[in-house]
Amino acid sequence: MSKLVWIVVLATLTAAPAAAQQGAIPDLRGTWKGQSESIILGTGNPHHAAPPSTEPRLNSVAFTVTIDKQDGRVFSGTFSSPRSDEKFVAAVSRNNTILVVHRSQTTRMVSCTELTKQP
């Protein structure tokens, strides 16, 4: 099973297909589903929105990630939750770390989501 871990601005491919472990760039296109485990300080983001708080809060959200474009190490797609859809761009490093661009002035958040590729 392939797993995708999303942590604020970095995501790491933790269990890539055998081809990726041999140095080939994995084909990530398709639909991936999973449940996030998050801790949030601040307002959150559109997926984890809540009133601002000075105390960290725990939250969990179902996600679908659809990767529709890939050219070698770079790819793009959409993060979707029941509350929001968000386009993203990303790149796969040589050690299969996935770098995703996310920015926020009002939130500190760590979120890990194990995503399973759908048939």
Image: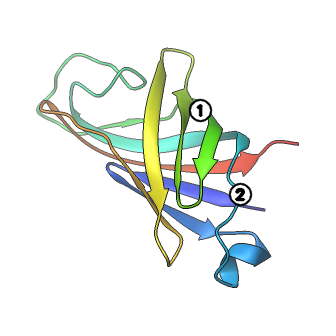
Q: Tell me the residue at 57%/16% (across/down).
A: 82
Extreme residue toward the front, this view: 71
Left or right of 58: which side holds 106? left
50 over 57 or under it: above or below: above
Q: Residue furthest right?
A: 119
Residue at coordinates 50% horizontally, 78% vertically from top-left? 95
User: N-terminal of the two: label 1 or label 2?
Assistant: 2
The residue at which mark 2 appears reads as 27
The quarter of the image holding the N terminus is bottom right
Quick one: which residue is furthest to the bottom in this view? 22
* Left or right: 8 in relation to 55: right
Q: Amino acid at mark 2?
A: Asp
* Vertical position of residue 114 compared to residue 109: above or below: below
- Frontmost of labels 1 and 2 is 2
Q: Amino acid at mark 1?
A: Phe
Residue 5 badge: none
In the rendered image, residue 34, in percent from the top left (x then y), is placed at 65, 41
Task: Name the spot of residue 32 as percent of width and height, x first.
Answer: 70, 41
Report x, y in % for residue 94. 49, 77
Disc 1 crowd, CA 10 A, few/some/many (<14, 14-19, 20+): many
Q: Residue at x 44, y 41 (%)?
A: 89
Q: Secondary structure at mark 1?
A: strand
Q: Nearer the viewer, residue 93 or 47?
A: 93
The residue pinned by badge 1 equals 63
Image quadrant assignment for residue 52: top left
Marks 1 and 2 in Cβ contact (< 8 Å)? no
Give the CA separation, mark 1 to mark 2.
20 Å
Pick the front one: 30 or 53: 30
SS assignment at label 2: loop
Q: Is residue 61 above or below residue 114?
A: above
Q: Total number of numbered labels?
A: 2
